[in-house]
C-alpha cells in the first residue's frame, strides 16, 4: 500500500451510508482503469460482500489474546482486576481472579500489570478475514464472530493484513466502522485523507463534529460528503454550520433515493447503480484525486 493514495471513508454514526459511498467510489476508480483495493474494516457489521453480491474466500483468522491465570504463581493481589478496562476479571479478596471471556477484549493490560508473571498467553479465534475480487477491484474484509468484542484488535489485524498484501494499488479505500473510538483511529491513522460521510440530521451533525475533531487530532485532511442530502425534513444547514466551524469543505451532496435504500437493505445495491449515479460518483472520485 506504500505508494497508493489511501482514502479513509468514515461516518460518525451508523446508517449514514458510508459503505455505499465507499463501494461506489471503489467501483468508479476501478471502472476508470485504476487498480483499487477496498478494505472493509467495519469488523462488527461488514457489508461490502452483500453490497457487491460476492462470495467470500477466507484468507486468515483474527486471533485474540486471552489470559490464563497460573494458580501456582498468582499472589491474589487483584492488580489485574483493577486494571481491566472491560471488567472482564472478577476478583474477591484472597481469591484467584476469574475471567468472564465474553467481556474480554484481548487488550493484554492484565498480562502487563501482573507483578509475578502469573498471567499466561492463550489465544481465541475472534473472527475471520476474507478476500474478494471483482474486475480490477480487490476487497479485503474483517469480521468479528458474534459475541466477540475485540473491535480494536480485529480492526488492526484487518489493516495489517491489508498492509501485508504486496500488490501495487493506485487507490486504497478503507471503509471504517462508525464512531470515533480506538478502532476508527487505528484505521484512519493509515489514511492520506479522510472522507467524512454524514446525513442532514441533528445526530449526523453532532457525530460529524466528533469525527472532524478526531481527524484534526491525528492531522489528516478531511472532506465531507453529505449523503441523503434531499431527505424529507433534512437539516442541511446544520451540516454546513459544522463544515464552516471546522473549515472543512462539503465536497459533494448525494441525493436521497428511497429505491436505493430499499435495494441496499435487500442486498441488491450493486444492481442499482444507474447511469446518473455512476456519473455522480465518477465526478466525486475525480474531485477527491484533485484534492490531494
Ligand atoms: S485482556 Fe484486557 S479485557 Fe481481557 S481480561 Fe485482560 S485486561 Fe481485561
Ligand atoms: S495481577 Fe497477577 S498475581 Fe495479581 S491477582 Fe492478577 S494474576 Fe494474580
Image: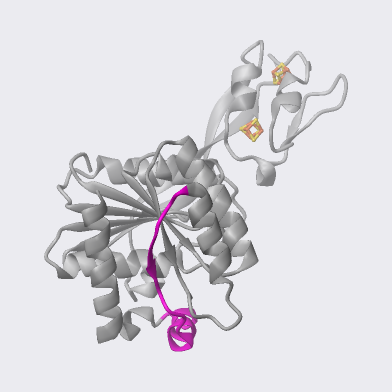
Residue 81, horizontal then vertical, whole percent: 75, 27
Where residue 225 sits, quadrant-wise, is bottom left
Where residue 25 sits, quadrant-wise, is bottom left
Examine the rendered structure and indicate whether residue 288 appears above or below residue 279.
above
Which is nearer the eye, 208 or 24?
208
Residue 51, horizontal then vertical, whole percent: 38, 74
Which quadrant contains ligand 1?
Answer: top right
Residue 267, horizontal then vertical, whole percent: 43, 79
Q: Residue furthest left?
A: 33
Residue 145 in view, yes or no:
no
Magenta stretch: includes residue 28 = no
Which is nearer the eye, 121 or 232?
232
Q: Is residue 264 left or right of residue 146?
A: left
Q: Is residue 2 left or right of residue 227?
A: left
Residue 172, horizontal then vertical, whole percent: 26, 52
Give the residues in magenta: 247-267
Examine the rendered structure and indicate whether residue 133 appears above or below residue 43.
below
Examine the rendered structure and indicate whether residue 73 appears above or below residue 156.
above
Where residue 283 sits, quadrant-wise, is bottom left
Amino acid at each position: 500500500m506504500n505508494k497508493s493514495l489511501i482514502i479513509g471513508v468514515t461516518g460518525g454514526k451508523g446508517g449514514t451510508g458510508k459503505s455505499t459511498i465507499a463501494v461506489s467510489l471503489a467501483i468508479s476508480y476501478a471502472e476508470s482503469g485504476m487498480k483499487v483495493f477496498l478494505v472493509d474494516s467495519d469488523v462488527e457489521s461488514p457489508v461490502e460482500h452483500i453490497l457487491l453480491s460476492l462470495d467470500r474466500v477466507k484468507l486468515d483468522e483474527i486471533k485474540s489474546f486471552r489470559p490464563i491465570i497460573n494458580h501456582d504463581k498468582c499472589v491474589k493481589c487483584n492488580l489485574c482486576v483493577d486494571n481491566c478496562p472491560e471488567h472482564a476479571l472478577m476478583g474477591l479478596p484472597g481469591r484467584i481472579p476469574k475471567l468472564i471471556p465474553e467481556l474480554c477484549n484481548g487488550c493484554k493490560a492484565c498480562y502487563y500489570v501482573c507483578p509475578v508473571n502469573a498471567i499466561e498467553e492463550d489465544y481465541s479465534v475472534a473472527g475471520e478475514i476474507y478476500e474478494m475480487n471483482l474486475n480490477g477491484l480487490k476487497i479485503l474484509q474483517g469480521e468479528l464472530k458474534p459475541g466477540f468484542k475485540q473491535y480494536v484488535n480485529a480492526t488492526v489485524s484487518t489493516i495489517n493484513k491489508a498492509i501485508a498484501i504486496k500488490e501495487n494499488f493506485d487507490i486504497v479505500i478503507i471503509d471504517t466502522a462508525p464512531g470515533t473510538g480506538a478502532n476508527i483511529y487505528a484505521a484512519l491513522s493509515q489514511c492520506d485523507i479522510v472522507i467524512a460521510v454524514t446525513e442532514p440530521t441533528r445526530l449526523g451533525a453532532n457525530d460529524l463534529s466528533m469525527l472532524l475533531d478526531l481527524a484534526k487530532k491525528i492531522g489528516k485532511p478531511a472532506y465531507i460528503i453529505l449523503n441523503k442530502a434531499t431527505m424529507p425534513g433534512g437539516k442541511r444547514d446544520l451540516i454546513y454550520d459544522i463544515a464552516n466551524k471546522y473549515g472543512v469543505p462539503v465536497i459533494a451532496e448525494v441525493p436521497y433515493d428511497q429505491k436505493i435504500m430499499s435495494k441496499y437493505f435487500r442486498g441488491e445495491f450493486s444492481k442499482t447503480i444507474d447511469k446518473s449515479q455512476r456519473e455522480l460518483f465518477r465526478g466525486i472520485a475525480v474531485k477527491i484525486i484533485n484534492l490531494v
